[in-house]
Amino acid sequence: MITEPSKLAHRLARLIAATGPISVMHYMGEAAAHYYASRDPLGVAGDFITAPEVSQMFGEMIGIWLADIWIRAGRPPRVHYVEAGPGRGTLARDALGAARRFGLEPEVHLVEGSPALRAVQQGLLPSAHWHDDLASLPEDGPLLVVVNEFLDALPLRQLVKTEAGWRERMVAHGDGRFVPIAGDRPMDAAVPPERRAAASGAIIESCPGAAAAVQAVAQRLAAQGGAALFIDYGYDAPANGSSLQALRAHQRVDPFVDPGEADITALVDFAGMAQVAQAAGARWLGTVPQGAFLGALGIAERAEALARAAPGQAGAVRAALDRLTGADQMGTLFKVMGLAAPAWPDGAGF
């Protein structure tokens, strides 16, 4: 279906006409900022559903993981729960509810830039503290950090191999369409030496925003104590190719059509993020598929308990379990990366 271009599309088209093509990172940043500032994108009526919205079991497993590592760290009395990109607050509600059963009742801090989502979160978590970024988080105790489907929405940089060498991938506009093209400035020096010999047409990606977020969390863990879970869809070994994609009404759409009107994301480079975290002073606990992680924490047993307690919902519970852990669902594509302070124990599931 052809729709009228959005205000953002008009603005970007005018910018490109006036100054020339913009980088993919610039384009993605503008599209994501407009998208999240203007709506609640979650749920059946939105554009996508995250794991916490699939089932309460997901948040419960996260809460159990946090409580377990906190107990084995000696139950520090003042501790902060931090979530970046908390969606509707569903994950925090379910995780904190599960953690409370083990005596963990942290102060709650949510890093959220969307006014629309903040309003929804306040309904579930009225006592939470909100932050625009990680810099304003408290410094007076260990942090228990959860970052679920946040890094994938941060703008990424793409470099493309041409016959003339490596160039930044840009976005041009013509005939009413946005199109990716190769820039004209040499970028060979920005490509790791071991990847420069790729074939013409190869694309490599990096995400400065994701690296900065992981570095900031790792530095806090090293200084204050605590642990963190980063959960997202991505890869755990270097890979070539564009992973840029967009979702609208739960269907994949062209990310270069109607920017700001669909959820635009890219795969997370977990191998690179682990290196960033370790360089910043945190311990990398490992990166594992989401299905294996949740399985190690007992999600199958929790699903059976829920099915027995509500037989009429047993089919829905088992379907949710499959969606969260199945190899052809979220179980393999999604990864879980664990970090901890140097003096904190290892986490379950890694």
Image (cartoon, rainbow, N blue to C red):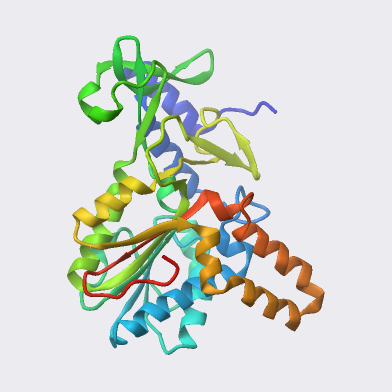
Q: Residue at x 48, y 20 (%)?
A: 179
| Left or right, residue 244 beside residue 44 | left
Tell me if residue 136 can be seen. yes
Where residue 106 appears, as percent x and y from the top left, is: 37, 81
Q: In this orientation, which residue lies closer to the viewer: 169 or 17?
A: 169
| Left or right, residue 77 beside residue 176 | left
Where residue 6 appears, as percent x and y from the top left, is: 54, 32
Q: Residue 28's quadrant in the figure?
A: top left
| Left or right, residue 217 beside residue 9 | left
Q: In this orientation, which residue lies closer to the viewer: 52 or 261?
A: 52
Q: Is residue 307 above or below residue 160?
A: below
Q: Residue at x 17, y 69 (%)?
A: 223
Tell me if residue 90 can be seen. no
Where residue 138 appears, as percent x and y from the top left, is: 25, 72
Q: Quadrant of the N terminus?
A: top right
Where residue 86 appears, as percent x and y from the top left, is: 46, 62
Q: Is residue 338 above or below residue 2?
A: below
| Left or right, residue 317 beside residue 112 | right
Q: Quadrant of the C terminus?
A: bottom left
Q: In this orientation, which residue lies closer to the viewer: 135 or 286?
A: 286
Total marks shown come to: 0
Residue positioned most to the right: 312
Q: Is residue 219 above or below residue 211?
A: below
Q: Is residue 334 above or below residue 144?
A: above
Q: Residue at x 19, y 61 (%)?
A: 281
Residue positioned most to the top: 163
